């Protein structure tokens, strides 16, 4: 194959020739154009004889994806946002431009086509072109063997090429848009109000994570890209909105993996006068309904395993999961020495430095997460890892909290919101004393609680991970249009 620079030079020379012939290689035009999908719906059910009698012309626009030259005739496929269609260009029928000019077009060029629809001998819907107009001249050749690229990151770096040549990738992001649309409709139908809270915050809060720091010149202050919208959303519940949700970005200055990107999308919602049990019911209903909407079944495959979203989903306490999957019976507070020794055997770093609740959670993550394949709510998290969740009345060492696991991934986190300002202040202070990442004292949030936060339950759902599940994508990078990469 010729070096890429030579191919580009040839295309640039073609573009120059077309200009010299009076062809505008980058015209500004408007439709109306029908889509390839609309052509299929209108004409695929007609017989070749019926199409022969139909003299209606169609007008379609898209990118040339194949070019088969037979001398005095050429077959091309053009692709638009809905699919592809074949176009048959004959020298004796093409009215505009001259056939010799059309032959200077290339794979990758964007064109409009006007012509009559017919079926080939193999039954393929095809447009017999009377006019082919150049809309955009492509100066670079499309990759010929895209799937053979050794560097998979090239797909993410040049996502525009990935979207052009890989229909599966386009389908992922179309499906992602449908997922977000479904979720938004689900909450609006239940009288939730969609809101927007600050992306730049004076105090980072709402989660334990390292924030990104920026600086506002006019005010002369450092600001933090938000790690979570939680504390602002609960201020709105205090203000009387009672049911709010937000679908937006969070930023965490932490590692990158197949499940983590520093910039990611979360759904967070809060409902006054409800409990975390209500949110588990709602989450089951919403996600199972979403799965059926997308797939017309409650059973899908992820990474080669069947996931069954049929309700009801399993619910198990953290203690129950540790006993079932790790054979570890902690029965409330376990002896710290035994727990530390066990954690060391599992390879957990410096377990002797961790408080008991945090260590129990780390052991759970190590022993149990990989076993939670079918949709499972894990409940009763230790208070040390749940600084914003309400304590259990019967067991103050645990909280009224759940996490949803599917395919070994945490998908959602919800709990009864801590609305006791005294307890909340103590927990903030505890975080600061333990020097947890991003720990701060949000005095204004405490003030808001002192005005009164009604009994409320709230939840966050990771949109990227949910999209991974519902599109059978192995990496979070597959479902983010422009994931963060090293330069």
Image (tube, helix red, strand yellow):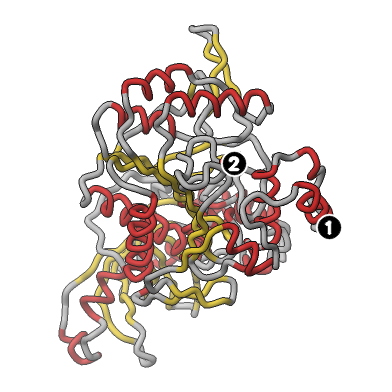
Nearer to me, 269 or 328: 328
Q: Is residue 162 above or below residue 436?
A: below
Residue at image location 32% in from the left, 68% down from the top: 293
Quadrant into which the N terminus falls: bottom right
Nearer to me, 133 or 256: 256
Residue 448, percent from left and from top: 37, 21
C-alpha separation, residue under disc 2 versus residue under disc 1: 22 Å
Instruction: Identify the residue position indicated by label 1 in the image.
Output: 345
Residue at image location 52% in from the left, 58% down from the top: 378
Q: Is residue 52 above or below residue 482?
A: below
The residue lying furthest to the front in this view is: 394
Q: Are marks 2 and 1 in contact (CB under 8 Å)?
A: no
Residue 280: name its quadrant: bottom left
Nearer to me, 257 or 240: 240
Residue 276, percent from left and from top: 39, 50
Q: Is residue 132 at all visible to an observer of this figure?
A: yes
Q: Is residue 6 at all visible to an observer of this figure?
A: no
Instruction: Identify the residue position indicated by label 2 in the image.
Output: 385
Residue 487, percent from left and from top: 70, 39
Q: Is residue 68 above or below residue 221?
A: below
Q: Look at the numbered disc 2 and give the secondary structure of its residue.
A: helix
- Mark 1 or mark 2, which is nearer the start of the sequence? 1
Q: Look at the numbered disc 1 and give the secondary structure of its residue.
A: helix
Left or right: residue 385 versus residue 269 is right
């Amino acid at each position: 194959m010729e070096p890429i620079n030579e191919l580009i030079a040839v295309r640039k020379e073609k573009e120059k020739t077309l200009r010299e012939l009076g062809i505008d290689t980058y015209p500004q035009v408007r439709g109306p154009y029908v889509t390839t999908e609309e052509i299929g719906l209108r004409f695929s059910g007609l017989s070749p004889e019926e199409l022969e009698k139909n003299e209606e012309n169609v007008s379609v626009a898209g990118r040339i994806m194949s070019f088969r030259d037979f001398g005095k005739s050429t077959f091309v496929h053009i692709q638009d946002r809905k699919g592809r269609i074949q176009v048959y260009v004959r020298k004796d029928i093409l009215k505009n431009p001259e056939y010799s000019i059309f032959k200077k077009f290339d794979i990758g060029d964007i064109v409009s086509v006007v012509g009559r629809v017919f079926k080939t001998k193999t039954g393929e819907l095809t447009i017999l072109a009377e006019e082919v107009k150049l809309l955009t001249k492509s100066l670079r050749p499309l990759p010929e063997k895209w799937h053979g690229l050794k560097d998979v990151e090239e797909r993410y770096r040049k996502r525009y090429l990935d979207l052009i040549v890989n229909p599966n990738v386009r389908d992922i992001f179309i499906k992602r848009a449908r997922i977000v649309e479904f979720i938004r409709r689900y909450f609006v139908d239940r009288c939730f109000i969609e809101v927007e809270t600050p992306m730049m915050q004076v105090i980072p809060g709402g989660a334990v994570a390292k924030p990104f720091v920026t600086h506002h010149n006019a005010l002369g202050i450092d600001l933090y890209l938000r790690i979570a919208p939680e504390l602002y959303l609960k201020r709105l519940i205090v203000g009387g909105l009672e049911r709010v949700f937000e679908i937006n970005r969070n930023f965490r200055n932490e590692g990158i993996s197949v499940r983590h990107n520093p910039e990611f999308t979360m759904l967070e919602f809060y409902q006054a006068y409800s409990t975390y049990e209500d949110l588990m019911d709602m989450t089951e209903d919403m996600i199972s309904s979403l799965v059926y909407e997308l797939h017309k079944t409650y059973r899908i495959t992820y990474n080669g395993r069947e996931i069954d979203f049929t309700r009801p989903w399993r619910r198990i306490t953290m203690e129950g999961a540790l006993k079932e999957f790790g054979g570890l019976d902690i029965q409330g507070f376990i002896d710290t020495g035994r727990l530390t020794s066990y954690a060391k055997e599992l390879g957990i770093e410096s377990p002797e430095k961790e408080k008991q609740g945090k260590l129990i959670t780390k052991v759970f993550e190590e022993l149990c997460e990989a076993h939670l394949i079918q949709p499972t709510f894990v409940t009763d998290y230790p208070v040390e890892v749940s600084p914003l969740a309400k304590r259990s009345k019967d067991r103050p060492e645990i909280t009224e909290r759940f996490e949803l696991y599917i395919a070994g991934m945490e998908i959602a986190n919800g709990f009864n919101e801590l609305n006791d300002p005294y307890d909340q202040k103590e927990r903030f202070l505890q975080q600061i004393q333990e020097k947890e990442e991003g720990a701060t004292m949000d005095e204004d949030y405490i003030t808001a609680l002192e005005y009164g936060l009604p009994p409320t339950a709230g939840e966050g759902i990771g949109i990227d991970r949910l999209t991974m599940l519902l599109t059978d994508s192995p990496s979070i990078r597959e479902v983010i249009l422009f994931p963060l990469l090293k330069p």
